[in-house]
Amino acid sequence: MSTNLVLISGALSKHELRYTPKGTPVLEVALVGKRTVGGNALFFRADLTFYGKLAEHWAEQLVEGQAYQAMGRLAYESWEADGVKNSRLRLVGEELFKLENADVRQEEKGPVLFGAENRVIVSGGLTADPEIRQTSQKTPVARAGLGFSSWEAGQAKNHYLELEAWRELAVSFAGLKKGSQVLLEGSLKTEVWEDKETKTKRYKRVLEVQRVTSLARIRTLEQSPREPAPKSGKAKAKSKAA
């Protein structure tokens, strides 16, 4: 299965506990923070979903404005409603910790954790050749898609993630092809736009890649070239007698 790890920290903006029709506890958590990139503090918000009795237990202890560290994974979901295909990339939380002595500052929109973590480590295969373009300032930017898999509830599940790389990293993406196996590290960001037909806001999570490593699979025993069969005893004896 693929590598799939999400590390997010931030000040708790809101949390809500609900239950599925089958009675499974579901805890929705929103963490907000600012991470430093090139001398700038970039704001982000991460919405995570926790499941099970542990989520129910955490809901009783969470304090809005407090800083927390979450660990989890990415989960791609797709469905069709009224003939329209929809999809989303969910952040499934698996661990949650309270951060002591965190740099939480009060801003106009509420408490924000400065120096927050927004990191994703994921591996998989590119779903198409990367598309390279330049911005109006002549900055190279590459777009690609990553397919990866996980093992859930006893069966394999496929996921999809959109990628974005800038500057020198965008140029290095040009050497990759559809099917290339890669290990990526980056940060999640949310793109917002207005649907031209419905006039409603649409949201999409994208991984802004900060590091890419090309991978090559090691052949298994079944894939290794077969060695020539050893000569039989009779053949050896005959050769010696000659």
Image (cartoon, helix red, strand yellow):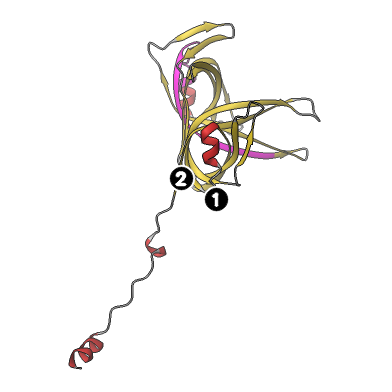
Q: Which amino acid does the dot numbered 1 rest on?
A: Gly
Residue 236 can be seen in this image: yes
Q: Name the one closer to the observer, 72 or 240.
A: 240
Q: Which amino acid does the dot numbered 2 rest on?
A: Ser
> x, y percentage for residue 148?
53, 44
Task: Find residue 214 and name its label.
Answer: 2
Q: Circle 2 sits in a helix, a strand or a loop, which is it?
A: strand
Q: Residue furthest bottom?
A: 242
Q: Is residue 8 left or right of residue 232?
A: right
Q: Circle 1 sits in a helix, a strand or a loop, which is it?
A: loop
Q: Residues within 10 Å of mark 2 (few under 14, many from 20)?
A: few
- Figure quadrant of residue 238: bottom left
> x, y percentage for residue 142?
59, 37
Q: Is residue 213 left or right of residue 208?
A: left
In the rendered structure, which segment of residues is drawn in magenta? 58-79
**For residue 53: magenta?**
no
> x, y percentage for residue 108?
59, 6
